[in-house]
Image (tube, rainbow, N blue to C red):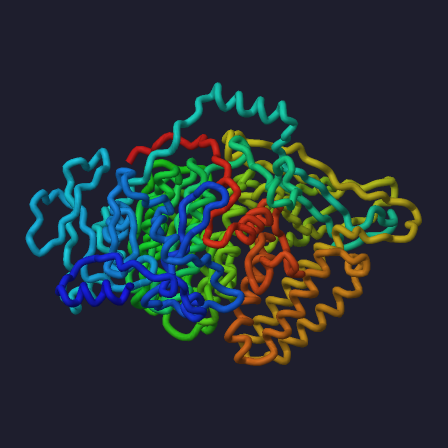
Amino acid sequence: MGSKWRKAKIALGLNLCVYVPRTLEEASPSADACGRYSDASSLSPSVSPGSRILDSVPIMPTTPTPSSSGLRLSKSNSRSLKRTCAICLANMKPGQGHAIFTAECSHSFHFQCIASNVKHGSKICPVCRAKWKEIPFQGPNLDPPHESARINPVDWPQDDAWMTPLRRLPPPRLASHRQMASPFQAPEPNVFNDDEPLEHQLDLAQISSVIKDVSDNNCIRTVEMKMYPEVTEVPRENSQDNFTVLIHLKAPGSDGSSSRNPATLPVISQTSRAPVDLVTVLDVSGSMAGTKLALLKRAMGFVIQNLGPSDRLSVIAFSSTARRLFPLRRMSDIGRQQALQAVNSLTSNGGTNIAEGLRKGAKVMEDRRERNAVGSIILLSDGQDTYTVNGPGGTHHRADYQSLLPVSIRGGGSTGCQIPVHAFGFGADHDAASMHSISESSGGTFSFIEAEGVIQDAFAQCIGGLLSVVVQELRVRIDCVHPGIRIGSLKSGSYPSRVMNDAQTGSINVGDLYADEERDFLVSVNVPANGSHNETPLVKVECVYRDPVTKELVCLEGKEVRIQRPKVAGQQVVSIEVDRQRSRVQAAEAMADARAAAEQGDLTGAVSILERCRKELSETVSARAGDRLCVSLDAELRELQERMATRRVYETSGRAYVLSGLSSHSWQRATARGDSTDSASLVQSYQTPYMLDMLTRSQTMPLGGASSQPPVRPARSFSSQPRPR
């Protein structure tokens, strides 16, 4: 039947968008065709439970067949697709007041949806990637020219008088040129102060009511602080150098956060987290074509669906140049749909200009008129910057990478705040050293997405943290109590620390904490002999931070660490808490030393460093007790040994893996690397309950992207008033 329709069309010489009915045999896709997917079929706005994205079999597939661990997209026949718009997922039944556009390739969409797609620069079918000779164009032309096919006016309330002609594309050469420019066609303002206003800001009475509600529900929003000396007693006649005191901090969490049942995911209420301003800077260079771009769009769809109406999102796409797709926009229902359409219009071409993408992302954050309490940038790239930094990955001096960072990201901007960049290196060809340097300098983390299929899980883990910030501007102060005690060192990783006042005072600038996140710092002091007292006070620890929801400054009362001073000490038992953190610091130092050796070409020496560290850790008190952190550290060191076995393996994945591990341990914050996002992985350090729950949401969502769970609960905004410009 279908062949007769086509013959009739050819015989009549028609150049129309005609839907050709298919027979049952034609409607059944072949096994080969079912293995191919479009890179535009992965996004969907939030829909009702049980609904799924319906993808058709592509007629002109351009996306490679995904591997077993890669793209997980739903499949459907063309009949199902005809009833559902692949862009907004709403029904397309005739007579519902919405114009329907059927393209040359027979795929149908709501006219407004596909017209928006074309407006963002896409001239190809979002389903099968076929290039269109005729495209939908929405304009006020009431009498379209004869060469344009005319269809009925759109019945949208705001566009009663607008007509909808189909506009023929220019010749192939011009079309090709314009395709290279997409989606960067709309002009940009010189100043990005067009961010969408924040939600209604609560007054003092409402804030007091919120605080009372939190208090009534016994949700104590204070940081938990504990201290542990390495041993509880030292003989009074003895002195000891390098005596270790552990400072343990834990951020407040939410009720039920220990649940792992997807049906009972923990809820961070409106009053327990701060809204977020998020800018994603995405690499759409030529190397991202095919499955990579499809998976990136799907991951961005997950991010968009899980942002609340108080959160704002802006997307920057970069290749040879960079372009802002849309300003900071609240993720309301309308905002989500518009964001999905913009991301869905992305195409890949050109080189890789990371510096330009970061500059534009930072400009969005700098120029915004209003500010949510939490702000961050997510950067993803699968290649090396071909415009700013030259040479092969991993061989640059650290100073070279500073040219990639705008001043505001480095922390020296006029706004007075540092914008953390959470960098994601995608695949085997990205510049891991550059991405790690960018994240480290800005206060963000670096994740290594080795397998294409885990990009959504990596994003899920990251936003699981960003959407649960409960502590900001956390600072720790350590004061020596005994006049004879001095601070020797502070093991604080990448957190800025300093020792002052003749080594009697120390401080650590911790910054933000996610819900239930923990931090551990090791303080080394000297213990003097004390011949006349039964105990010796060592240090006093206090901390101060800001609650991002109420904006209140919280000061925790200082706590002293004391040890007993008997005449004769009994059997010394080392604190397992202190021993565990010593092992963590020792493993991180071994990783850094092994990486330095590998960069010098001494892979044998690098493997030996890791093996020696594994042996030493196996003999510690915590390892013998089967401590989970020690098991995880040993698994990570063993994995690194395998990735440093040969130069080829190290260049392909070893460098990125070790840098992501160093980023995780130095910030004590979860990063994605290898199989770390897999629930069965042994390498799972620093993941918070809410990160794990967001991972569960990502890994158990229905195929096609529509989550059966509601989006992330909205945050209540207590933002500052708009800044005068």
Q: Position of residue 109 (x, y in %)?
A: 29, 50
- Count the labels in the image: 0
Of residue 596 and residue 32, the one placed in the foreground of this image is: 32
Residue at (78% x, 51% y) in the render: 230
Counting from the top left corner in percent of width and height, residue 509 is at: 56, 45
Q: Nearer the viewer, residue 145 or 419?
A: 145
- In this rendering, position of residue 407 left or right of residue 643: left
- Rendering quarter of residue 128: bottom left
Q: Can residue 552 be seen from the camera position used here?
A: yes
Q: Pick the quarter of the image with the N terminus.
A: bottom left
Percent across and percent down for residue 502 are 63, 47
- The foreground one among 177 and 206 is 177
* Residue 341: x %, y % from top left: 33, 49
Q: In percent of the image, x 60 and y 60: which residue is there? A: 676
- The reply to whether residue 398 is visible in this rendering is no
Name the residue nearer the viewer: 578 or 651. Answer: 651
The answer to which image quadrant residue 636 occupies is bottom right
Is residue 461 shown left or right of residue 19? right
On screen, residue 138 above or below 210: below
597 lies above or below 69: below
Give the residue at the far top of this rendering.
Answer: 205
Which residue is located at x 32 percent, y 44 percent?
Answer: 93
At 53% across and 24% down in the image, what residue appears?
210
Quadrant including the C terminus: top left
